[in-house]
Image (spheres, coloured by chain):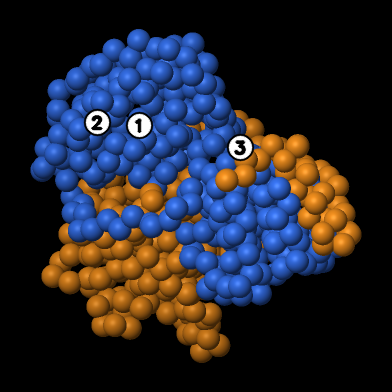
Chain colours: A blue, B orange
Amino acid sequence: MAGTWVFVEQRDGNVRKVTYEMISKAKTFGDEVSAVVFGKGVEGLAADFAKYGADKVYVVEGDVFANYNTGAFVAQIAAMIQEYNPNAILFAHTFNGRDFASRLAQKLEAGLATDVIDAEISAGKGVFTRAIYAGKALAKVEITTSPILATVRAGVFEVVEGAGAGEVVKPAVAATDADVYQTVKSFEPTVSARPELTEADVVVSGGRGCKGPEGIKIVEELADLLGAAVGGSRAAIDSGWLGHELQVGQTGKVVNPNLYIAAGISGAIQHLAGMSSSKFIAAINTDPEAPIFNVADFGVVGDLFKVVPLLCEELKK
Amino acid sequence: MKVLVCVKQTFDTEAKIELKDGKISDAGINLIINPYDEVAVEGAIQLKEKGIAKEVVVLSAGADKAMDAIRTALAMGADRGILVKQDTAADEYQRAVALAAAIKDENPDLILAGHVAADDGSSQVPTRIAEILGLPHVNVITNIEIADGKAVCTSEADGGTQVTEVSIPAVISSQVSWNEPRYPSMKGIMQAKKKPVATIDAVAADAKSTIVEFSLPPAKTAGVKIEEDPDVAAAKLGDWMKNTVKVEVK
């Protein structure tokens, strides 16, 4: 059994941090850890993975892998599984990662644990903790089909540096253009100087209490001062003050930053499900009875229009 | 064109989760169509209203009470339903196998579903169905255009927005921002009662994963809550952020 594989989540050579988090976690299983990267012009990344302890780096290069597409990626990794027989493969729980892992799992008629927040893998057995009902409950899932497959939530495992050999392996290219069944017509990157919601260390969110775009602007000023991502409750999204992709909650994103600041958010259970696993939570709300205060480490009963600008001044000192 | 929509009956997203005998308790829980699937139903009905779809079939795998979810979709405007009777504890593989078998018999031109269910959050089943049926798929779409045997889908992608073209039949999964699902009208609710719903048994398949334990996350306890003049409150909050959380200010 060729240890644990960590599938590298990258676009144009920009590697998502969750990749290093997965490598760091995989090292704790005590078995060989390999990074697997598909792309075009990605071989230079190999040293990066060694830095976090990857013993091997499987590099697959080619035009057909330039952008993620399910068909070619599944065909390629399926051939590599046959050839190298890994015990387990971890994917990032991104849109691409879950798409890839789901199609692969079905092709192999295997189990798959998605969006895991804890993992324990031994030979032939994976035990994963998943947050269900958007974090309102936890399920421990056991998988014994081979290889063990899981997608991992960003931000839950710590990145630990640790030198690995990082031996580059170049598997045979098995996928061809004939495996591609999705034609990508365009990709428009989200233009934002802010970090992505699910990967940010600090998230500042606004809710109904923002009352409109002016309130959101105050939230954004605080976010930019902290290098934070901006999010919103369903009320702020439904009012059209923020884009849907910024919704935090059960029908939006689940975030777990180091610090979550809820401004003008009452804390409906729908919203709490998306953020209550944050390490520190601060809340600013005019209603002293707002449920958000039940989960806040530091709560301020007050008007965000007054408190947040003053807080910005305070932080600049 | 025939459009088939897969819907799952889930807990209301405002539901509080409790355990009973080590399992998730459904006592007193309001059941709804998974919000992501509801968007798929709306998308299918809109295709019919545009004259692109001739028939909208709604399919659900679950317990007898999942019939309510089917009836709701019929009240919104779907034409007929199929209930695949299956244990609600089925895993994603069993679910996909059961749904794919029913879909195969229907032979639709387009299969729609929500990209994730608000209960288990797995986001596997639509993609698994596509693999079983040997069809292309696109996930997390926010728009779809059908023309010349192709579906052009706009989807929320990692770090951006992507437009992807696939040939149909295809399995397409929706993001909630695709549309605003309609409320069933009184007339729709009355008509739904007369629309045909077939009930079939799920194809037997072994589970590929096992839930060995359910638990509730440790309850987050409230910390300090202050109610002071804004400048004092801001100073104290700032102090906590700098010294306890140790935030970096740009």
- Chain holding disc 3: A
Residue holding disc 3: A139
Please name the amino acid that badge 3 sits on.
Ala
- Near mark 1 (Cα within 10 A), the count class, few <14, some 14-19 or many ≥20, is many
Q: Is A215 rendered above or below residue B208? A: below
Q: Is residue A96 left or right of residue B18?
A: left
Disc 2 or 3, which lies upstream in sequence? 2
Spatial CA span between label 1 and label 2 = 10 Å
Disc 1 or 2, which lies upstream in sequence? 1
Please report the residue visible at 23 percent of the width from the left and 64 percent of the height from the top. Answer: B152
> Mark 1, mark 2: which one is toward the viewer?
2
Q: Position of residue B204 (x, y in %)?
A: 41, 42
Please name the amino acid that badge 1 sits on.
Val
Q: Position of residue B145 (x, y in %)?
A: 25, 71
Q: Position of residue A211 (x, y in %)?
A: 66, 74
Any part of residue B217 in sight: no
> Mark 3, mark 1: which one is toward the viewer?
1
Secondary structure at badge 2 equals loop
User: Which residue is situated farthest in the bottom direction here?
Assistant: B187
Q: Are dots 1 and 2 in contact, CB under 8 Å? A: yes
The verdict on a common chain for dots 1 and 2 is: yes
Secondary structure at badge 3 equals strand
Q: Return the mark for residue A42.
A: 2
- Near mark 3 (Cα within 10 A), the count class, few <14, some 14-19 or many ≥20, is many
- Chain holding disc 2: A
User: Which residue is situated farthest in the front direction here?
Assistant: A317
Spatial CA span between label 2 and label 3 = 36 Å
Residue holding disc 1: A8
The verdict on a common chain for dots 3 and 1 is: yes
Please name the amino acid that badge 2 sits on.
Val
